[in-house]
């Protein structure tokens, strides 16, 4: 992670990077000081390298172009009128052509942009409308090529943090059969299909969430989530749910809207700054987060350990070993690591926790 | 060329004098715009538009600063507007804004001595590159060719092209390291 990706930064500076590479380069520059410095120097170098053939910016040519343009402008009004007539008829032709094009065009073809962030990574992107999105590990964000033209809709699978750029067009996030709608806010959506929960947390502004929100009704409902609030839905852990990823069929066991204190915000958004905050959540939930963050597989084969609750935070910890060592300090667990697989079990002096 | 010519009462210049002003500033303004946009074609357009504006409005403009400062400011504003409207995110520009360096004009753009020195440094660094590497770099920098096109023309892989450009720029960066280093430490 620490090594500078020189080829990638070079491609970005020389404008040869594709969309994905641009996003990656932007992420590296914004999150790593060494990358930022390397990028700044390379940008500066690329700029200065023009001096090698400074003649290719041709001032003689530019001056003669300038002369041409300014003579056209000096021509009399009769000339201008003539040009206007030509321009007007051209516009009419274009209009007619466009009408026929629209009328006879086959169904609209949209290309879809899909941003996949693998486990163990995180990516910051800017959407065409200026909305900033941070996408968490193991998540996918999709949007169509007409994004921003009349609609602003994205499809999220996983977790993302949205800083919506202001516009009259509502911004819509589709995640797990829920629709989150807003106009200019900052919020976090956590909707991993393999999690037994769905979360929308609002930092600024207000959003509306639409979907199945009731334990005893399948009807779609709508709820407003305001500033400093979080909407949490928990699903039953029946096997059924795992087989059937469509949450319509899984059972909601809890729906709650909670107020969050400024200190708790980090629990939801800390990940965007590589800060993991666990506040009294079970090892079972923690392992899911860690698996995505570190691209590992964690096996907890003891139900007592699974239900053990843990509180603690980890800042900029690149290595899961370090995180586990810290956890070991305060909880009596033992673990072994073999490649990507980590097994967590009871420690020698393990006492069951009274819950 | 003496900078006074371009700094005194431009609104009185005739076409002949303006030609000198145009040619004196055009390349420098293009380079200046390119720092914000990293796009030579658009930068040329902005430099030329700014000079055209100056000519057309020469009778109605009044300056509180020198004409040179006015031109640079105009170019900068045009670039910033473009960045805003096209929603371009340029980390270099952000960095300059953050550190309040956005208004600085690089010394090698205004001081002919530094400009010469810089050109010489760059010439030396590029001329000592291996032949293929130099060729690839020139094609990329001065012929606007995409890496893919260069690969096809030279019948090498795209990865090789990428590597050549990375090596060339890295070597150039190192040879300029001293001056860029100063800029950066000044920024910090």
Image: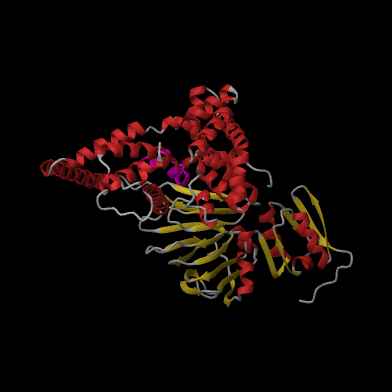
Relative image position of residue A353 (x, y in whole percent): 80, 73
Query: Who's the residue at 61% across and 67% down the image?
Result: A268
Q: Is residue B93 within the magenta segment? A: no
What x and y, as percent, mark residue A258? Answer: 58, 77
Residue B5 at x, y = what percent? Answer: 35, 41
Colour scheme shown: secondary structure
Residue B35 sits inside the magenta stretch? yes
Decide if residue A36 is in sight here: no
- Magenta range: B32-45
* Residue located farthest toward the right when viewing the structure as drawn: A348
Q: Dividing the picture into quarters, in which one does residue A352 lie?
A: bottom right
Image height of B97 relative to A178, above or below: above
Nearest the viewer among A296 and A59 is A59
Q: Is residue A336 left or right of residue A54?
A: right
Q: Nearer the viewer, residue A181 or B152?
A: B152
Outermost residue on the left side: it is: A78
Counting the numbered discs, the total is 0
Residue drawn at x 13%, y 43% as measured from the top left:
A85
Judged by its main secondary structure, the magenta piece is: helix
Q: Position of residue A239 (x, y in %)?
A: 65, 62
Above or below residue A160? Residue A223 is below
């Amino acid at each position: 992670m620490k090594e500078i990706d020189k080829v990638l930064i070079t491609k970005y500076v020389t404008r040869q990077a594709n969309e994905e590479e641009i996003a990656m380069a932007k992420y590296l520059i914004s999150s790593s000081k060494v990358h930022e410095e390397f990028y700044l120097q390379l940008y500066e170098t690329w700029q200065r390298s023009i001096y090698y053939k400074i003649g290719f910016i041709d001032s003689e040519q530019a001056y003669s172009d300038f002369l041409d343009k300014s003579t056209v402008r000096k021509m009399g009004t009769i000339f201008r009128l003539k040009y206007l007539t030509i321009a007007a008829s051209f516009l009419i032709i274009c209009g007619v052509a466009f009408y026929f094009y629209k009328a006879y065009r086959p169904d609209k073809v949209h290309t879809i942009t899909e941003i996949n962030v693998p486990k163990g990574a995180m990516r910051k992107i800017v959407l065409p409308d200026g909305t900033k999105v941070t996408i968490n590990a193991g998540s996918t964000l999709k949007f169509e090529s007409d994004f921003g033209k009349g609609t602003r809709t994205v499809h999220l699978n996983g977790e993302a943090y949205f800083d919506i750029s202001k516009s009259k067009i509502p911004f819509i996030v589709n995640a797990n059969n829920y629709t989150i709608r807003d106009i200019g806010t900052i919020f976090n959506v956590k909707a991993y299909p393999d999690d037994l929960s769905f979360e929308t947390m609002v930092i600024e502004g207000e959003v509306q969430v639409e979907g199945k929100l009731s334990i005893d009704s399948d009807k779609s409902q709508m709820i407003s989530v305001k500033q400093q609030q979080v909407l949490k839905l928990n699903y039953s852990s029946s096997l059924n749910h795992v087989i059937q990823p469509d949450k319509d069929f899984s059972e909601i066991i809890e729906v709650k809207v909670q107020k969050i204190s400024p200190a708790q915000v980090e629990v939801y958004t800390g990940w965007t700054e590589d800060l993991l905050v666990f506040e009294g959540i079970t090892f079972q939930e923690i392992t899911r987060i860690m698996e995505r963050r570190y691209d590992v597989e964690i096996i907890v084969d003891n139900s007592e350990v699974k239900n053990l609750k843990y509180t603690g935070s980890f800042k900029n910890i690149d290595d899961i070993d370090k995180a586990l060592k810290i956890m070991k300090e305060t909880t009596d667990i033992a673990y072994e690591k073999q490649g990507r697989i980590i097994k967590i079990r009871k420690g020698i002096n393990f006492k069951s926790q009274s819950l | 060329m003496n900078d006074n010519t371009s700094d005194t009462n431009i609104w009185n210049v005739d076409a002949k004098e303006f030609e000198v002003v145009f040619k004196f500033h055009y390349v420098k303004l293009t380079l200046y715009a390119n720092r914000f946009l990293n796009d030579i074609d658009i930068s040329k357009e902005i430099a030329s538009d700014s000079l055209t504006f100056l000519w057309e409005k020469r009778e109605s403009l009044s300056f509180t600063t020198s004409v040179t400062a006015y031109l640079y400011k105009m170019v900068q504003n045009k670039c910033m507007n473009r960045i805003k409207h096209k929603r371009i995110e340029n980390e270099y520009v952000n960095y300059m804004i953050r550190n309040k360096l956005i208004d600085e004009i690089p010394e090698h753009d205004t001081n002919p001595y530094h400009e010469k020195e810089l050109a010489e440094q760059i010439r030396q660094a590029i001329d000592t590159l291996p032949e293929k590497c130099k060729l690839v770099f020139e094609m990329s920098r001065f012929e606007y060719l995409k890496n893919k096109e260069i690969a096809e023309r030279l019948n090498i892989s795209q990865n090789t092209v990428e590597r050549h450009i990375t090596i060339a720029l890295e070597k150039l960066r190192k040879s300029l390291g001293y001056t860029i280093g100063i800029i950066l430490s000044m920024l910090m």
